[in-house]
Image (tube, helix red, strand yellow):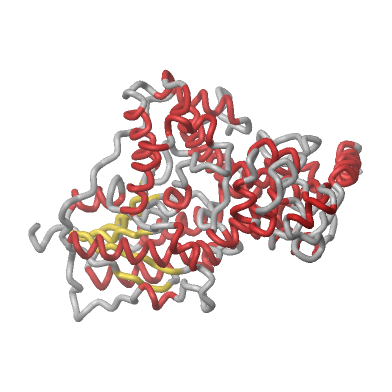
Amino acid sequence: MPPSSPVTLVWFRHDLRLDDNPALAAAVARGRVVPVFIWAPEEEAPWQPGAASRWWLHQSLEKLAAALAKAGAPLVIRRGPSLATLEGLAREYAATHVAWNRRYEPAVVKRDTAIKQALTATGLAAESFNGGLLFEPVHVATKEGRPYQVFTPFWRALLAREEPAEPVAAPRKLTTAEPVQGTSQSLDVGDLGLLPEIDWAGTMRTTWSPGEAGAGKRLDAFLAKALATYGTDRDRPDREGTSSLSPHLHFGEISPRRVWHAVREAAGGKPAAKITGSPEVYLRELGWREFASHLLYHFPHTTDAPLRADYAKFPWAQDPVGLRAWQRGRTGYPVVDAGMRQLWATGWMHNRVRMIVASFLVKDLRVTWLEGARWFWDTLVDADLAANTLGWQWAAGCGADAAPYFRIFNPTSQGEKFDPDGQYVRQWAPELSRLPTDEIHAPAEADGRTLEQAGITLGRDYPEPIVDHAEARKLALEALKQVSRGK
């Protein structure tokens, strides 16, 4: 690469990979590359990365920095503000271009738009690419040109389009640029202070392998071991039936196009619209990921307010004691407690259990969905603003394609249905492990002798239920009537 070739700053954000990275590929095709990461969480307020996300980001940045250095272009790490940092780096390296892959969170869209305008005004070429979705949110619309608010027609519209573009392999070699004056200063990943001061992440370290290589291994394992049975096993938290790719996708360690085409290939290479069975069910889940970003882009207020305006007056309860018990997995309902403890230990929770614990919070306790969204945001390693918003508004009945509020999960029967042998509960609520299977999801209903034989005293070894589900259901339905009456 001649020393006079153009220099592009590649601004890494939620695209921490070399494979199928459109911004990086465009920069490599043009000339020399200066990879950049800027830590400016305040620019994403009020939804700046939570504790679990910061832990993951630290690990992923270390892996990205090593991969870039091996390819020939070390990662330059700086603190924000983002615009001033990019402008300074452009002068430092005599860059002609700045490239990044787009994000769709409201605060980030606003910031990136302003940055692109400002950089362009200084004479730099500012380019953004779609590196995080199969299709841009603005490219999928109803016949009337409006955004979708129901998933099924949205999914049909996706399938009616041409297949997403084939992923592009990672460049084997990068040519970087040297600063025009002096030596460039870069922070170490550890200088960003992403890791917790108190090391609570032990189980997370043994559960996850953040980074691009870890994402690829996770995909390969899913295709080999779980894709064929995904349609049935995905609802079983006691089985390894899901891909667990959500944090890797969120941080862009693997592209959705790479996953989409890998699943298609595993299903015989058919067009997505003709794939059936478990592979189709999984592709549909990728469709839900697209739908979440579609909604967030078109309805940015939904991060903090219901999409359905009538729910703004819903009579949510103030229950700090109940909220705390829910957060800590001390509700007295085993599948709820198991899920919340899995979340606390690993930074992740099985999706079926996410629905169960969300229903319990917003319907059994009638605590606002925003409290649940904020807790998940801080504790999930896959805390994606679009998916988090969609999921919680779905549970609360106030969002797009939402579950009706009157559909209230019974936490006991949900546990019995989806954890029929009690193995999930035994793993995450081990104090209940000696209970018989037919009692493990309702210890409060077990007789004294059964509890004694299991070594359990309710209220001491395991909590009594903090709410009576039948009574809570009545109160939730009464609250719903107040909304429907416009009160």
Residue 486 visible to an observer of this rendering: no
Q: Nearer the viewer, residue 93 or 261?
A: 261
The x and y percentages for residue 407 are 77, 35
Rendered residue at 62%/44% (across/down): 390
Height in image: 41 above or below 311? Answer: below
Rendered residue at 38%/61% (across/down): 60
Height in image: 119 above or below 300? Answer: below
Residue 183, image quadrant: bottom left
The x and y percentages for residue 19 are 28, 48
**Which residue lies most toward the left here?**
2
Q: Nearer the viewer, residue 191 or 408?
A: 408
Q: Tell whether 412 sits left or right of 31.
A: right
Quarter of the image for the C terminus: give it. Answer: top right
The x and y percentages for residue 476 are 86, 44
Q: Tell whether 107 sits left or right of 219.
A: right
The x and y percentages for residue 184 are 25, 77
